[in-house]
Amino acid sequence: MSAFIKFFHITLWQPLFNLLILFYIYIPNLGVAIILLTVLIRVILYPLQAKAAKSQLALQAIQPKLKEVQKQHKDNKEEQAKAMMALYKTEGINPFSGFLVMLIQFPILIVLYRLFWQGIQEENYQYLYSFVQRPETINAIFLGMNLNEPSTVLAILVGIAFFAQAKLSTPKKPAKSDKKGAGAMFGDMFQKQMLYVFPIFIVFILLRLPSALGLYLLISGIFTAGQQYLAKKKRQEKENV
């Protein structure tokens, strides 16, 4: 085992595996254990996710200013980039906050994929901490689903949750205006892909993966959509004051 994989195993895989088993010991239902683990992860990531949602809404609000900057420096991309970064700084916006949250969640998804790809194997019990009891068996049935196998229904629900999440983060279209430039057209195309194509892509991926991973993504997606809704509502209330 390489040093990097060993570090990844000890610092992330092993703690999440132990937490999952610990939840299962107290509530012997794998589905509930996964939900509890998901909620715990989302609570830990809540400050970062809330900041990302706030920055995303702020970015939507300053779109007219950004377009003005782009127009002013359309012939000088370097000055345009500097002016945009200066605007972000003035408005107190971190345009990379959403990327940071995704970057942090990616290793967690890899860990959960490794955990559930072939079900929870007995050979992994050697990595349990001394205070975590070894379960005799793992019942993978949850709401009539075998969490070790794909579930079409759960995959579709995850797709709906991701669609709702993308819909909440998509800015409202302004009233009809003049012809759009190439940049604006590309932006609209990208938003449509995120709104429709990505959720469908997730559904097709989950049709081949254990539904345990789908359950994590469903709860995580609902949690994130709720955060975005609350952030949007809070901003609207602040603007109406």
Image (tube, helix red, strand yellow):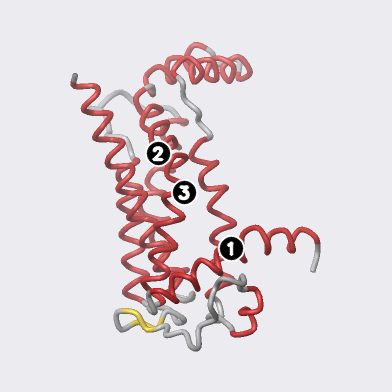
Distance from disc 1 to disc 3, alpha carbons, whole Å, reads 14 Å
Q: Which kind of residue does numbered mark 1 sit on?
A: Pro
Residue at 24 percent across and 23 percent down: it is: 238
Mark 2 and mark 1: span between their CA atoms? 24 Å
User: Residue 160: image x %, image y %?
Assistant: 31, 60
Where is mark 3, residue-wise?
44
* 2 or 1: tag closer to the N-terminus: 1
Count of picture labels: 3
Name the residue: 46% across, 48% down.
44
Residue sitting at 40 percent across and 34 percent down?
A: 56
Is the residue under label 3 in contact with that under label 1 (CB below 8 Å)?
no
Picture quarter with the C terminus = top left
Alpha carbon separation for disc pair 3 and 2: 11 Å
In the displayed structure, 87 sits above or below 220; it is above
In-front residue for pair 41/91: 41
> Which quadrant would residue 168 be assigned to in this image?
top left
Can you tell which of label 3 and label 2 is closer to the viewer?
3
Q: Amino acid at mark 3?
A: Ile
Please give the label number shown on residue 15. 1
Crowd around label 1: few <14 · some 14–19 · many ≥20 (10 Å): some
Residue under label 2:
50
Residue 74 position, x and y percent, is: 53, 17
Quick one: SS at disc 2? helix
Tell me residue 190's x, y (percent).
44, 43
Most distant residue in the front direction: 131
Q: Secondary structure at mark 1?
A: helix
Task: Tell me: 180 left or right of 83.
Answer: left
First along the sequence among labels 1 and 3: 1
Type of the residue with mark 2: Ala
Q: Residue furthest top?
A: 72
